Amino acid sequence: MLKEYSATFRYILVIMDLILILPAFCLGYYLRTGPLSGWMWFERALGPLHDYAWLLCYLIIFAPLVLYSMGVYRPFTKVSVSRIKICSKLIFEEIGHSTEKLGNLNSAVSSK
């Protein structure tokens, strides 16, 4: 019974991911052409949405495959605690290095 529930839950996750691809794509396009269009990284304007609609075909095919290969649909109980600790340690170390670099940059700018 538990295995059947787990398999059903994974199918529901895949279906929900497929359903959420379109709104996420549209939201990303809206943010890129609207509020974020003034950022220096986004100086080049985008064309109309229908010019990029063909990407949805690839997203619908490859997104679940990539998520599956990354282990997103694996039961969480099979993930070891040590692996979670290692990942969280790497994340927090990277955040620490980023804030340290930002502090150094701010001090260098303020000293000029």
Image (cartoon, helix red, strand yellow):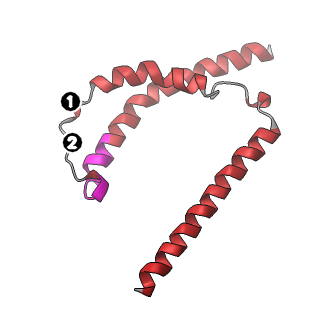
**Is residue 111 toward the left or the right of residue 11 in the image?**
left
Residue at 51%, 22% (x, y): give it.
64
Q: Give above or below for 25 relative to 16.
A: below
Image position, residue 28 (x, y; %): 35, 42
Residues in magenta, as a range: 29-41
Residue under the point 42% across and 80% down: 109
Identify the secondary structure beneath mark 1.
Answer: helix
The quarter of the rendered structure image containing the N terminus is: top right
Q: Quarter of the image holding residue 19? A: top left
> Disc count in the image?
2
- Residue shown at 65% from the left, 51% from the top: 91
Q: Up-down: is 73 above or below 86?
A: above
Q: Which mark is residue 51?
A: 1
Considering the numbered disc 2 on the image, is that residue within a helix, a strand or a loop? loop
Kindly identify the amino acid type of the residue bearing the numbered disc 1: Asp
Judging by the rendered image, the residue that carries numbered circle 2 is 46
Relative vertical location of residue 48 with respect to residue 70 in this rendering, above or below: below
Query: Do the numbered discs 1 and 2 sit on residues whose CB atoms are within 8 Å?
Result: yes
Q: Earlier in the sequence, mark 1 or mark 2?
A: 2
Is 33 contained in the magenta span? yes
Badge 2 amino acid: Leu
For the residue pair 104 and 96, the one nearer the viewer reads as: 104
Residue 100 is situated, as x and y percent measured from the top left of the image, at 58, 69
On the image, the x and y values in percent for residue 83 come to 76, 39
Residue shown at the point (40%, 25%) measured from the top left: 59
